Image: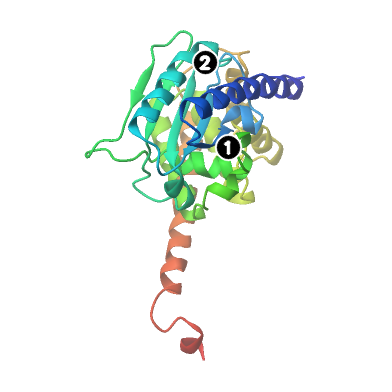
Amino acid sequence: MWQAHAEHGLAVVLGYVRRLADELAQVSDGMLLAAYLHGSAALGGWTDRRSDVDVLLVGAEAIESAALDRMTSTLLATAGECPGRELESSLVAAADAASPAAPWPYLVHVVAGRATPGRVVRPTSGSPGDPDLLMHYAVCRAGGVVAFGPPPRQLIGPIPRRSVLRYLASELSWGAEHGSEAYTVLNACRALIYLTDDQIVSKIAGGEAALSRGAGPDEVIRRALGQQRGSQPEQPPSADALEFVLAAAAELRAAAAALQAAADRATQPGRGSAGRQ
């Protein structure tokens, strides 16, 4: 039943994003190269009451400010049709997508929905990028759904595994202080799946996998899944939930540190083939 609901949600969301991408391609004078659906709709964890419609847009290098303004206006105007909680969209330049790296530059972020006022964020000298793009790129490469343009891996370069692990650990620490129990616990579950399987999955899939593997406290994970699905009321993370989440963050940081140390050793003088002879 849940899988059927998620598949129906993907069809509805993808139809909306395809219509949006067609409009953006027109108003940008052909400067839109791709539109990728990512987040819960793409990964199979969609719930229309809780999920956002997450879209990554890739634009040509020559995009002009007037076209950028028209695209921004279109994103705001069509957000009222959004089938989820709200539209969260990021537009990036093709060169930045091809070689993703800090400070994670972007052209514009637009967040808007039927019941939320539109918010437009542009880069500034003090804040030239968005670290969340790291995970947007990784998710698009792993399971992004094409609404417009070529497959994601043709336009988006790879993200080092150690960078993803560090990001996931920092996200868990943030969630422990600011997030709901469902958000924090299920993010920990799916982060552990990434650690062990190198797979990016939805919150719900991560929680179910952690349950089946005994990878966390059964009661805590079941409670978080119930909250995510709307069958139980939301609540802040309990003490046992926080213990699980912070332990998961520590595991992720340790794994990232080990990968970084290995990368550092590989680049030291004398570590090449001549040095090993």
Q: Is residue 9 above or below residue 265?
A: above
Q: Is residue 78 above or below residue 268?
A: above
**Rendered location of residue 235, percent (x, y):** 48, 17
- Residue at which label 2 appears: 85
Q: Nearer the viewer, residue 72 or 124?
A: 72
Which residue type does callout 2 highlight?
Arg
Q: Taking the image as drawn, is residue 99 in sight?
A: yes
Q: Taking the image as drawn, is residue 218 in sight?
A: no
Circle number at residue 189: 1
Quarter holding residue 203: top right
**Rendered location of residue 29, percent (x, y):** 47, 31
Q: Is residue 268 above or below residue 69?
A: below
What is the crowding at mark 1: few (fewer than 14 residues within 10 Å), some, or many (at least 20)? many
Q: Nearer the viewer, residue 273 or 225?
A: 273
Q: Work out which quarter of the rendered image holds the N terminus and state it.
A: top right
Quarter holding residue 8: top right
Q: Nearer the viewer, residue 208 or 104?
A: 104
Label whose residue precedes the other's in the sequence (2 or 1)? 2
